[in-house]
Image (cartoon, helix red, strand yellow):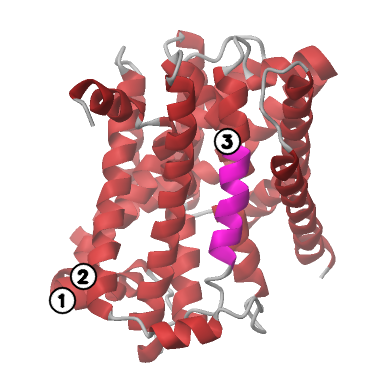
Amino acid sequence: MTGKRRKNVLGLLGPGFITAALVLGPGSLTVTSKIGANFQYRLLWLVPICILFMSVFTLITTRIGVNSDVSLIGLIREKYGKITGIAIGVGLFLVAASFQAGNAIGAGIVFSEMFGMSSVPWVIAFSALAGILLFFKTFFKILEKIMISMVVLMLLSFAVTLIISKPDWVLLIRQFDFKIPKGSEFLSLALVASSFSIAGAFYQSYLVQEKNYEGEQKRLCEKEGISGIIILGIITSMVMLVAGSVLYPQGIQVNSATEMGKALEPLFGNYAAAIFMLGLFAASFSSLIGNATLGGSMLSDALGMGQKLKSKKVRLTIMAVIAIGAIVAIVFRGLPLQLIVLAQGITILIVPVIGVMIYLIARDKAKRKELEFGTLLKIITLLGLVLLLAMALANTYSIFIK
C-alpha cells in the first residue's frame, strides 16, 4: 500500500468506528457479560445475524449520506412532510436523552468504585468534559480519535484475554444451535437491540456527510463503515466468549461491574477489575459523547436548525442531551423505572418507523440511479425490518401486557 493510499484509508477511519462505539455502550457490555456468565456460548449465534443486519443498514445509510447534499431527515421531510421529519428527529432525541443517564452513570461509577466515593463528582466532571469538547472547532476530529482509541482499547483487552482463557471450541460449536434457552428471552431481546441499533445506522448518514467524501473515497467509506460494525460484532462476541469461559464455570451471575471485571482475571490477575473498569469507562464515555451527538444533531435537524457539528445551534442541542443525562444521573443516582419504561416505549414506536423510512428513501434514490439497491440487499433489508417489528411486538408484550 502506497503512502498516499495508506493516508486515505486512515483518514476514512472514523464514521464506522463512531457508530460502533456509540452502539457498544455500558448497557451492551453488561448484557453481553450476563449472557456469557449465565448461558455460556448458547446465544453467540445471535451476534453474526445482528451484525449482518446492522452492516446492511449501515451500508445503505452510508450510500444515502455520500450521494446526497441533504440530510436523511431532510430527505424524509421532502418526501413525507415536515411533521414526519420532526417526529423522527424528536423521537431519536428522546431516546438518546432517556438513555443518556446510563452513559453518565457508567462513566462516573468506574472511578467512584475505584476510589470508594460518590459517583456524583465524576458524573459532573465527565459530563462537563464532554461539553467542553464541543467548543473545539475540530470537535469532529476529536470525536473520531476518542471513539477509535476507546474501541481499540476494548478490542485489545478482550482479544488477549480470550486467547489466555482458552474457550472450549468444541462445546461452542455444539451450542451454536440457533436455539434460545429457557430464561434467556429478555437478555436475547436486549442483545439484539444493542447489536442491531437502527438509530446508530441512521446516524451513520450524518457522520459520512461531515467528512465530505469525493470520488473513490465514497467506495472506501462504505468498507470502513462495515469494518466498524464488524469490529463491533467481534468485540461483542469476545466479551461473551470470555464471560462464558471465565465466569460461567465459576457460577458468577454478573450483578456488578466488579463481577464483570473478573472475566479479565486470566490476563490481569488482581488488576482485572481495574482494567475492566477502564474498558467500562471507554464504553460509557464514548457512548456519552456519541449518544448526545446523535440526539442533539437529530433534534436540531428536525427543527430546521441544521445538522453540521460546527453549527452553534447543533452544539447547544448536543449539550442539552449531555445536561439531561447528568441531571437524571445526579438526582436519581440511577435510571428511574419510569424513565426506562418511557425510553423503551419510545423505542418501540420509533425504531420500526426509522427502519421503514431508511428502506423507502433508499428505494426512492435507487429508482433515480443514485444508490445501488440490488435484490439481495433488498431481501436482507426487508428481513431486518421484520426483525425490528418482531422486537417491537415482543417488547410491547413484555412491558405493557405480560
Report the label total.
3
Badge 3 amino acid: Leu
Residue position marked by numbered label 1 in the rendering = 269
Q: Position of residue 72 (x, y in %)?
A: 65, 21
In the depicted view, which residue is nearer to us: 332 or 231? 231
Q: Position of residue 338 (x, y in %)?
A: 66, 53
Circle number at residue 54: none
Residue position marked by numbered label 3 in the rendering = 59
Q: Which quarter of the figure is the C terminus placed in? A: bottom right
Of callouts 1 and 3, which one flags the residue occurring earlier in the amino acid sequence?
Answer: 3
Q: Which residues are magenta?
A: 46-58
Residue position marked by numbered label 2 in the rendering = 272
- Residue drawn at (27%, 59%) of the image: 277
Could you say which quadrant of the image residue 260 lies in? Answer: bottom left
Task: Answer with left or right where residue 127 lies relative to residue 191.
Answer: left
- Residue drawn at (76%, 16%) of the image: 368
SS assignment at label 1: helix
Badge 2 amino acid: Ala
Q: Position of residue 214 (x, y in %)?
A: 45, 13
Q: Is residue 97 above or below residue 392?
A: above
Q: Is residue 119 visible?
A: no
Report the mark closest to the observer, 2 or 3.
Answer: 3
Of callouts 2 and 3, which one flags the residue occurring earlier in the amino acid sequence?
Answer: 3
Q: Position of residue 317 (x, y in %)?
A: 52, 21
Badge 1 amino acid: Gly
SS assignment at label 2: helix
Q: Are marks 1 and 2 in contact (CB under 8 Å)?
A: yes
Seen from this angle, which residue lies furthest front? 1
